[in-house]
Amino acid sequence: MTLPRIANQRAIVDRRALADAVATVSAEQGEKSRPAVVELLRDALARGRDELARRLEAKPSAGYECAQGQAFLVDQLVRVIYDHVVGRVYRASNRSTGERIAILAVGGYGRGEMAPHSDVDIAFVTPIKPTSWCEQVIEAMLYFLWDLGLKVGHSSRSLDDLVRMAKSDLTIRTALLEGRYVWGDQPLYEEGSRRFWDEVAAGTERQFVAEKLAERNERHKRLGDSRYVVEPNVKEGKGGLRDLHTLYWIGKYIHKVRDPSELVDVGLLTASEYRQFRRAENFFWAVRCHLHTLTKRAEDRLTFDLQREVAMRMNFADRPGKSAVERFMQFFFLQAKQVGSLTGVFLAQLDEQFAKKARTGFLARFKPKRTRKIGDFPLVADKLGVAGDDFFAQDPVRLVELFTLADRENLEIHPEAMRLASRDAGLIDGAVRKDPRANALFMDLLTSRNDPETVLRWMNEAGVFGRFVPDFGRVVAQMQFDMYHHYTVDEHTIRAIGLLARIEKGEEKEQHPLASEVIAKVSSRRVLYVATLLHDIAKGRRGDHSILGAEVAMKLCPRLGLSPAETELVAWLVRQHLLMSATAFKRDLADYKTIADFVNVVQSVERLRLLLVLTIVDIRAVGPGIWNSWKRQLLGDLFLSGEEMLRLGHKQHGRAERIAAKKKAVGTLLKERDALIGTVGRQLGDAYWIAEPEDIIALNLQQMDAGLGEPLTVEAHWYPARGATLVTVLAADHPGLFYRIAGGIHLAGGNIIDARIHTARNGTAVDNFLVQDPLGRPLNEASQIARLKTAIADALANRVKLLPQLTARPSARARADAFEVQPIVIFDNKASNRFTVIEVGALDRPALLSRLARALFEARLIVHSAHIATYGERAVDTFYVTDLLGEKLEGETRTRSVEKRLLEAATEEKGRKAVAA
């Protein structure tokens, strides 16, 4: 394989001029010329890179040209170095037949594609075991390359060793598959190439394909197993460059193609599919080259902090409702989706070719040909196929039926059928969308009790899903530029539907016991699936996606065959799909008014059940690590409290009866120590008894009894019921206690997810905190708990300077700086009968909670409980507060003053000034 002609090559590097300059310097300086030669080479490399960077800047989408130019540049340097070493440094006038070297570019370099800071993979091949002269030449060349700052992957082997190792090692075999002659002894290279195909490749085609696909699957698994992760790896990720390379390697190994375009000639891709292959490859190479140029290193991860920069370099612009970076990433994922489709049809076509070979035996002609059919669809090799090129044109409703049958019959779809479905998806027009049969088939698939997730994903890959539901087509490959959502909107939605189906089948009982129990009682099953499909359908539009999504539901549901009552219920669920999580994670569930307000919106047990299940699948489908036992507990508490109120009505037991019931439950837990309720328990007011759960009260009473007379008691232990560490602080109450405790917990590496602050009648603060690490993982090791206790004690005793140390701590989410989160403060005097609820949204960063708590202390407010929710880079901290007299916060002047303090505390720059002061 030779490199294609590159425009204006000498502007990148003029090899003859460089070789002449090296020869001149060598002649003038003799043995001392090496530094000067290295400087000439280094200058040529730098100028070549600058020229390629300039070309990329002038034509930002020309990724493939840039990659070829990098390989060309390295080729010329390798040739000049070899000629210099062999001609001057280790000149041998009468070399033996064994003193020959062929230099091969292997791997990506062999393919003639390199990003600006890619490794240079070179193989030095000799006829026999390398002689002393060969070793000297190879070593001298390597030192020149290293001196240029290039990262070189190299091997030095005889022909026999090369063949033997290629037979046993897949990595070496793949590298040699793309071996390209660069310089040196060409007949030796040709002999090596012949032996590779005759002795290594021949007869091992199936094995190679199986091993390459297993390697690909393992790589996908390692990198998230989805092409829709929001920080993708351009080279190694699913749907990225390596997947395209894998197709080329397989085609080359089996059919000896020398260029991807020849995959069309051997029947593995159509001409149209090859154009898609080349378009995706060129785009990914452009992204990869921009990444390397920006970071000045071999960086292949498209992280949040780089996405904006690359989008800007590639001339993506903002559009209404969608930023430039979101448009760029949507295009990225559309290309990754295309690679997935190409991979599917390519591999299935390969299977077909292997199967044809197996069927060409002597007896094959005598086997009767029988074509089984399911409806109008023939079965081809036990896969659902199509009968002719115009199959979908005859009846476009078949485009939907294909996928419904695949799910119903548990069959794969034949690659030719997928090809035609992708090609003919445009046949789905307004008439097909209104067709009752088409809509019934779609609903059968959406609400399937088999595996709707897999087949809906196939439908999406073929482009049929987005054509049949155009509103869904608008969110295909759409990312949300934040650290909370791990997948594109379409992938998130399909995963949520899959999880819903698994919960209904009872496969998620361990993770979701309550949802598994509740879903069996749901009477509006179709409503639940359609609401899951539509809950994020309006993302990326101007306005609130919940409200806009409800409008989409009102128009779409009747078309799908839902009754007016079902349509109304779907629209309500879409409009309120964030209500339950917002209430559970950002409000005090022990406050009667919280539950009453929630129930006032929900209004029926059926709605509550539907909302619980939808909330759970929505959160779980956001990405790995988002769901945890703490969220499960909060949603469960809210559901049970809401269900109780809906069943019994608003006239529940009075405050005294509720406290009496709580004391009785605590007494059962305390057993023989139940007398503590009447002793130390007397010090605790009614608000405490209502707010805290029974198990925590039982623990608090025993801690208070044990700590009588002690100025400070800090208890911390793993609390599996909530998936967090319970930290209880008993201390003499004084202003600023809360922010100091919060600071100590953060210094110890903890993150507060919930806090309840109480003052006993004797002036003792009884403060309960639930703590995890900043990424939501447990703090349950003895050393972690000991560190928590020590840090809190030090903070309360003023032994540490909190603010400077907190600010110096690195953020757990280091890339959060790539995002802009405008801080916001919301006051709500209606959410609680006793307290003003203050909600602060801001960029999550070290010491945020401690800063906000300090600002409230300086504003002369008392914090009674705090609830902390994080959504990637964004934190929402909610405080239930009163003034020093126990009254709600009233008056515009007062609220504005508090707001100003909180905004200053939430802003990074102000925080830095405070530290400097």
Image (spheres, rainbow, N blue to C red):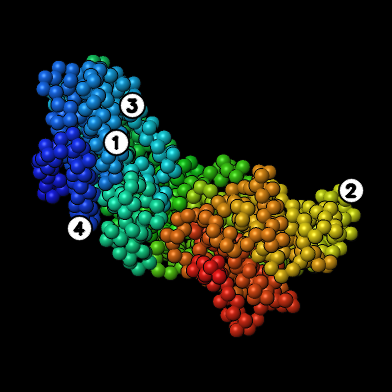
Q: How far apart are the two marked residues, 2 and 4, measured between alpha carbons? A: 81 Å
Percent x, y of residue 93: 11, 22
Up-down relation of residue 822 to residue 795 (above or below): below
Query: Which quarter of the figure is the C terminus placed in?
Result: bottom right
Q: Amino acid at mark 4?
A: Ala
Which mark, residue 152?
1
Instruction: Tell me the SS state at disc 2.
Output: helix
Which mark, residue 170?
3
Total labels: the figure holds: 4
Percent x, y of residue 579: 57, 63
Up-down relation of residue 158 to residue 215 (above or below): above
Query: Which quarter of the figure is the N terminus placed in?
Result: top left
Question: First in sequence: mark 3 or mark 4?
Answer: 4
Which residue was labeled with disc 4?
58
Percent x, y of residue 512: 60, 47
Q: Amino acid at mark 1?
A: Val
